[in-house]
């Protein structure tokens, strides 16, 4: 295990540990999942900001279809990740630190959960707004008006806000979980070295 003090990131290295363990695998999965999810959120955010600036019917229709598809994929990935955290990761921390930090970690986990829920609400708002906007494009044969583009921008802004909240959520989660993970792995190394 290597800790980069400049970035305060835990860099897990199974070779640099006295005893690779299930804990190490959990923390490596967390790190890999976060990197993948942050990259997907960043890409979605960039597309969403581009969508908020679209002023052509064809561009709006194509971009909305792509945004909806990618948003649905990110929501699916986030749901799977959240389930894994709830079922596999967080129980490890609450069991391991039961006596020492439970009163202080529970509020932090609660805040993380609320951030996640808020981001999902913004994503759902985008999905609803984009569905309505795509229906407007289907119903109207001619040019769409300013009201359409205002609705498009509002929906994309919801998606962008959801991405910002998620990135903040990942950062806070890493600041909370990675030091705890480092302590667990250090304890295991000391125990078996």
Image: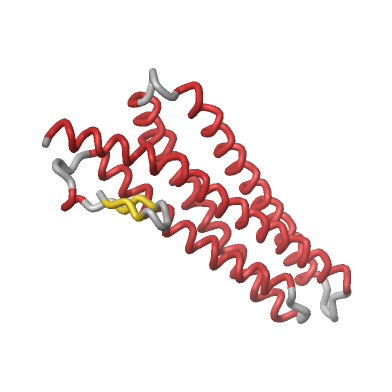
Q: Nearer the viewer, residue 172 or 140?
A: 172
Q: Position of residue 64 (x, y in %)?
A: 66, 69
Identify the residue at image location x=32%, y=44%. Answer: 27
Tell which of 148 and 41 is nearer to you: 41
Q: Quadrant of the C terminus?
A: top left
Q: Nearer the viewer, residue 150 or 181?
A: 181
Side of 142 where 191 appears, left or right: left
Seen at 62% across and 56% down, the residue is: 164
Q: Position of residue 4 (x, y in %)?
A: 35, 55
**What is the residue that sits farthest to the top in this orientation?**
99
Residue 30 percent location from the top left of the image: 37, 47
> Considering only vertical position in the picture, is 87 above or below 52?
above
Q: Residue at x 61, y 65 (%)?
A: 45
Colouring convention used in this rendered image of the protein? secondary structure
| Numbered-mark total | 0
Q: Quadrant of residue 159?
A: bottom right
Question: Which residue sits furthest right?
Answer: 146
14 relative position to 39: left or right? left
* Residue 56 horizontal side relative to residue 118, left or right: right
Residue 30 against residue 157 in the figure, above or below = above
Determine the residue positioned at 64% across, 54% down.
Answer: 162
Furthest residue to the left?
193
* Relative vertical location of residue 158 with respect to residue 93 in this rendering, above or below: below
Q: Position of residue 114 (x, y in %)?
A: 61, 37
């Amino acid at each position: 295990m290597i800790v980069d003090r400049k970035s305060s990131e835990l860099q897990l290295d199974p070779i640099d540990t006295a005893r690779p363990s299930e804990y190490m695998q959990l923390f490596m999965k967390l790190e890999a999942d976060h990197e993948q999810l942050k990259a997907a959120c960043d890409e979605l955010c960039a597309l969403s900001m581009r969508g908020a600036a679209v002023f052509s019917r064809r561009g709006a229709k194509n971009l909305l279809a792509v945004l909806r598809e990618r948003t649905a994929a990110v929501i699916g990935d986030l749901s799977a990740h959240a389930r894994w955290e709830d079922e596999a990761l967080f129980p490890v921390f609450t069991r391991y630190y039961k006596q020492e930090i439970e009163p202080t970690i529970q509020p932090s986990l609660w805040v993380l959960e609320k951030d996640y829920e808020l981001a999902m609400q913004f994503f759902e708002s985008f999905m609803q707004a984009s569905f309505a906007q795509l229906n407007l494009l289907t119903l109207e044969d001619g040019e769409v008006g300013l009201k359409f583009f205002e609705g498009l921008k509002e929906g994309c802004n919801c998606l962008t806000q959801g991405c910002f909240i998620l990135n903040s959520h990942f950062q806070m989660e890493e600041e909370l979980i990675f030091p705890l993970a480092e302590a667990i792995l250090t304890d295991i190394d000391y125990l078996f070295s």
